[in-house]
Image: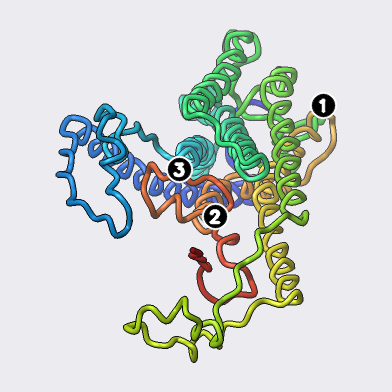
Amino acid sequence: ESDDLVPLPNSHRQGLTVIAVLAALSFLSSTAVIVHLSVKLIRWHLRTWGQGRHPPKEPDPLPDDLSLGLAEYHFTANLPKSERSGTRRTKTHPNQFLVLIYNLLLADIHQSSAFLLNASWANKNAILVRTKVCWVQGWFVSTGDLSSSLFITAIAVHTYLAVVRNYTPPQWAVYATVVLLWAFNYLLAVLGILLSNNGKEAGGYYVRAAAWASTAGTPWHPRRLTPSQCWVNIKYESHRLFLHYLWIFLAFAITGILYTLIFLSLGKPRHQTPEPRLPTSSTIDSPMFAHDNTIPSPAPRLQQHKPRSSSNSNSSNNSSNHHHKAFLLYPLIYILCTAPLALGRIATMAGARVPTAYFCVAGALITSNGWLDVLVWGVTRHRLLFGGAVDAPDTGLDTFAFMRTPRGRRFGNLVWVEG
């Protein structure tokens, strides 16, 4: 069951071809966004490095203008230059979400690379074990599936802290998390190879995965085979469970719980500062507006803006709650794409018979993680991913596109300036 498969059944070859096409879509889309973000980060680092070498000159003091109070430099004249407002420089860092999404896309490239290698099997009309392609595919399946789950979970934790706890972790903690997750991911893959001596006694560690083949103990027959690719040898089931599946299902649970808590937290009624009453035509004629005759009477325009009634406020809150459901999209896509294949492999390990069509669909779903991540994150958080500054500190609710403009309002945001 773990040996070469020559030739491929027609349904098997067609399934691998479809999976390879979707893998190519994920690989190209993830790579394109990675290149875009890399260029942004390189330009930002070069610009900040140049500004550090040539700091801007301190502006000349402004003339005294006592009509609106003393100029600011009068209050900071006795302070060191480094502590004066406007001259003190603080070190900036890349946006934390950009750092995490960058690494998630790297993980998606790992994962899509593994399934992209199915094109080699479809082209050769065979799956050849003990070849470099087979070993590389097994390595990328192990590291790609797990790293994608780890960084999806890291983004969920970061979003929970920013949205629910209103807490932004320090930059060093984000960098340390990224390093530890990649180290943990590769450690588990290397550990399996070392413990098995690269599968020396079982014909290889990365071979044609029997979890994608017929049920263990069933006599080999081409018609009973289900779509397969190279992965951990079926003889190392404990490695599959404790070095791979355990952490993926743990990531399922954590991600689902955190986004559910975000959804529930945003659905609770919150204390909101009452919006100030807009001036009406009667207040326009008051002495407060009479000192400047150069301002034309805006009464006709202002009469169109009536103070919100309680019914309007309730409808606004209801429409805002309507948008909160979009947070459930993130764990839903992740679980729907990753769980079918993992559950199918667990089922075959337990001796269940899984049909060919199931693994074709499961393989197509999991390799779609890359282009779906680009689509979902690019649409819902495009402000951080494609627009704005690299060092923008925003991480909260206003960075989600579906939270920007309430359903009951047609354009933009309302900004109140009150004196």
Query: Which label sits in the foreground, 3 or 1?
Result: 3
Q: Which quarter of the figure has residue 188? A: top right
Kindly state the secondary structure of the residue where label 1 is placed. loop
Q: Residue at x 69, y 18 (%)?
A: 239
Front-most of residues 133 and 173: 173
Secondary structure type for disc 2 = helix
Residue 164 percent across, percent down from the top left: 67, 43
Residue at image coords 69%, 39%:
255
Tell me if 53 is positioned left or right of 300 in this view. Answer: left
The picture places residue 198, in percent across and down from the top left corner, at 57, 12
Q: Secondary structure at mark 3?
A: loop
Instruction: Characterize the local packing of mark 2: few (<14), some (14-19) or many (20 or more) Cα atoms within 10 angstroms.
Output: some
Q: Earlier in the sequence, mark 3 or mark 2?
A: 3
The residue positioned 60% from the left and 41% from the top of the image is 162
Q: What type is the residue that disc 1 sits on?
A: Gly
- Quick check: 387 above or below 414? above
286 or 12, nearer to the observer = 286
Q: CA distance from mark 3 to mark 2?
A: 12 Å
N-terminal label among 1 and 2:
1
Give yes or no for contact between labels 3 and 1 (Cβ–Cβ under 8 Å). no
Quadrant of the drawing holding the N terminus: top right
Residue 81 appears anywhere in the view = yes
> Could you tell which of marks 3 and 1 lies nearer the N-terminus?
1
Instruction: Evaluate whether residue 5 shows in this view.
Output: no
For label 2, the residue is: 398
Find disc 3 in the rendering and name its residue. 393
